[in-house]
Structure formats: structure tokens, C-alpha cells
Image: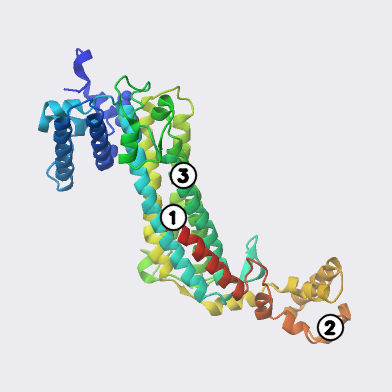
Amino acid sequence: MKLWAGRFQKETDDRVNSFNTSLPFDNRMYAHDIEGSIAHAKMLAATGIIEASDTEKIITGLLSIKNDIENGTLTMDNDAEDIHMFIEAELTARIGDAGKRLHTARSRNDQVAVDIRLYLRDEIDSLLSLLRDLIEVLLSKSEEFSDAIMPGYTHLQRAQPITFGHHLMAYVSMLLRDIDRLCDCKKRMNVMPLGSGALAGTTYPIDRSVTCSLLKFDSVCSNSLDGVSDRDFCIELASAISITMMHLSRFSEEIILWCSWEFRFIELDDGFTTGSSIMPQKKNADVTELIRGKTGRVFGDTIALLTVMKGLPLAYNKDMQEDKEAIFDAVDTLKECLVTFIPMLDTITVKRDNMRLAAAKGFINATDLADYLTKKGMPFRDAYKISGSLVGLCVKNDTVLEALSLETLKEYSDLFAEDVYDAIALETCVRTRVSEGGPSPDSVLRQIQLAKTELEKYK
Ligand code: ARG
């Protein structure tokens, strides 16, 4: 028998029951539902809406339900409409009338709204902690390889010399923004909807500040219609997660390239790769490919949430029950990606020599050659042209800029002198790129320091 059965003359059709129920996916919020109900019950007693003795029974009952769910003695009855109904029915079965008083001055609409916020608030904390772990790994690798020269790319063509540490620190910048976005999202999520009732508040003398402080919210939502129909915080979180996934996906793509025989910049630990059922030589970077693939799925979650909400009149509509699978999937996916990606990254072997070899090809010091002439007084555009002609000459003769004789160089400009060879040596090109944020080992070490300070703010 449904809790709301009074108005009906017929049992709900079984097909509706199984179509309607959210228990299979909202059961994960049981602890947060209980936390919210305990706060609500305390508020009801504090304002004299129900007896303190009833609240005591409610709290004991709810805690015993929590305990029994956790030790496996209470299994969720799939007939229940959702986790809220399941717990309330179970509570009443255990403690009788006091259980029936719990839902005074509350609706499932404000109840579910508070539960999702409580649940996601905790999930954001675990995501933040994983992102911090990932940054720590990147910081230590960046430090270790702050002087490992590699080619930097644009258009996936070798462009200018950088270091592996510099490259990794780019991801630290992205991840720090991701952390900041999650914190920002948590701030707006941390507003309490309880007390909004079904949509129009309540006539009981509730005190929302009591539940607000018991549940550690920063404030209460200021409009009851918005309180029960706002899912912006889910959309915001899914969007923030999508951006993080996009970063992980770009990183994964690079790792896949770096592991290929064409690059050979890094090698993944055997424990983080897979083989082929037919090709004995294969060592595949499946983890990163899966992350790249799962990114599409998380984008789908974000679009699903936006689309569910876009046509809904105020206030609550059952469409909103569809919020959970999407946002839970986004959170779960990012979490499991990070849990695997972090140790995978931590155990990579970096092949400095291969990076250095790749950097020696592709004329990545051609800009430095132009800069050399510019620093001797030639306008940059003219210097650029000369450097370009010299690259052309090298391509024709299958050689590199630093192998050209001074005589040949002087045919193009008499500003060339013996010191050009040092100026275009890759080590010099990297060491002298000291501009803030640049690839020189000193600059990378400074970036690491700044990132450490930034990270402290989020601990
Ligand atoms: N299971 C529902 C959900 O997730 C809870 C709220 C139900 N409210 C209602 N008026 N039917 O949205």
C-alpha cells in the first residue's frame, strides 16, 4: 500500500510501479536522506511542531535503519517508489506513530532537493581530493623532468623547444582551474531548500535556520518555488566535470601518441596496459583510450540534464527524477577515471633520450635563429625570412640548421658569427626562454612553486 494511497481506489499498475521507481538509483542517497530527516525532526521538536520524545524515537529509528542498511540486514524493497518513501515506510514500521510525524511540514520535493545537495557536496569533496592527488603526481614529475628537452607542437608539427616538465605543468594549470570550478559550484550548491515544502512553503512555524546550521549549509534558498525546482547545481557540476573530462581526454590523447612507436616519449607500466588476443607484440594504452571515450558519455550526461530541465514549468515535475542517473554517472565516471589515471601516470617511464632526439629534428630552433639576427639589429620580419630560407636549404640537403657552416650562414647575412651555434643549441633555446610561464627549467620550477601555493588554498 502506497503512503499516498488514500485518494485512490485502485492499486498502482505493476508496470507503472517499475517505471516510476527511482529506488534502484537513488538508494545510494540513503545516508544523506537520513541525515536530512534527522535535522528536520530536530527542527520540528525545537519549534514545538512535534514532541521531543517523537523526535528521539525518529532519530533512533533512522539510525537503526542506517545501521541495518550498512550491515546488510535491511535490503531495499524494490516496490518502494524511491529512497525517501522506503525509509519513511520502514521507519513507521519500526516506531509506529512517531514515524508518521516525520513528514510534517515537509514534502518529498524539498526532501529530494536537500538530499541531492548533501550527496553531491560529499562527492565534490572526493573529486577534489582525487584532483589534488593528480596534481601532486604531476608536480613531482614536472620537477624531475624540468630540464628534459622535448619538441613543443602546434598543429601536431614540431614547433619550438620546451621541456617535459613545462608540458606537464600546462595540465596542472588546467586542473587547478578545474578544482576552482568545483569549489565554486559547491558554493552555489550549498544552499538549503528544506522548508520550501512541495512548492509553497508551509503554514507550520518552522525555523529554517535550525536545519540550515545542522546540515552545514551556508544559507537557505530564498524562494520556495526555486528551492524545489532548481537543478542548476547538477548542471553546473556536470559542466565542471565535463571540462575536467575534456582535460583528461586531451591528456590521454597525448599519452596515447607518446606511447606509440612513432613517438616513444614514454612507456606505461605493464600493470596499466593491455595486450592483444592476436598480436603478440601489442601493449595498448587502453586506460587512456577509455578515458577519451568516457568523456563523450559525460558530455552526454550534461546535455541530458540541460534538456530535461529546459521545458519544465515551475515548480517540481517528475521529469526531474531523471537528474539523478545523469549526474551520478558523471560523478562516478570522473571518479573512476581519476582512480586509474593517477597511478598510471605515477608509474610511467619517461624516455628523455627519445624526446631529445625528436627535438633535434624538425627545425624547432628556427625561431631562435631568427631571434639571433633580430637581437643583432635586423628587423624580425627580415630575420624570419632568412631563417626560413635556411630551413629550406637544410630540407634540400637533408641537414639541420646547427650543421650549416658559418660560411654558408654568412651568405645569407653578415650578422652571423661564431656565437650563432651556441644561440641555436637546443639547451640554450630552452634555458633562455625565461619569460614568465615559459619552458626554461628555472621558469618551470617557479611555476611548480606557484602551483604548490595555489594548491594549498584548496586543502
Ligand atoms: N523520486 C523523486 C525524484 O527523484 C522524489 C520526489 C518526488 N516528488 C513527487 N512529487 N512525486 O524526483
Q: Give the foreground label among 3 and 1.
A: 3
Q: How is the image coloured?
A: rainbow
Quarter assignment of residue 191: top left
Q: Is residue 15 left or right of residue 429?
A: left
Q: Earlier in the sequence, mark 3 or mark 1?
A: 3
Q: Let me know if residue 81 appears in the view.
A: no
Q: Let me know if residue 183 appears in the view.
A: yes
Element carrying mark 3? helix
Q: Give the foreground label among 1 and 2.
A: 1
Up the image or down, 188 lies above or below 127; here it is above
Residue 11, percent across and down? 19, 18
The residue at the point 59 percent across, 78 percent down is 356
Q: Earlier in the sequence, mark 3 or mark 2?
A: 3
Residue to which mark 1 is pinned: 291
Quadrant location, the N terminus = top left
Up the image or down, 227 lies above or below 213; here it is above
Checking the image for residue 178, the label placed there is: none
> If the picture is divided into quarters, which one holds ligand 1?
top left
Give the alpha-carbon distance from disc 3 to disc 2, as whole Å. Answer: 61 Å
Residue to which mark 3 is pinned: 185
Residue 402, percent across and down? 73, 82
Residue 417, percent across and down? 82, 85
Q: For label 2, count other residues whose C-alpha is less than 10 Å away and answer few (under 14), some (14-19) or many (20+).
A: few
Up the image or down, 287 lies above or below 61; here it is below
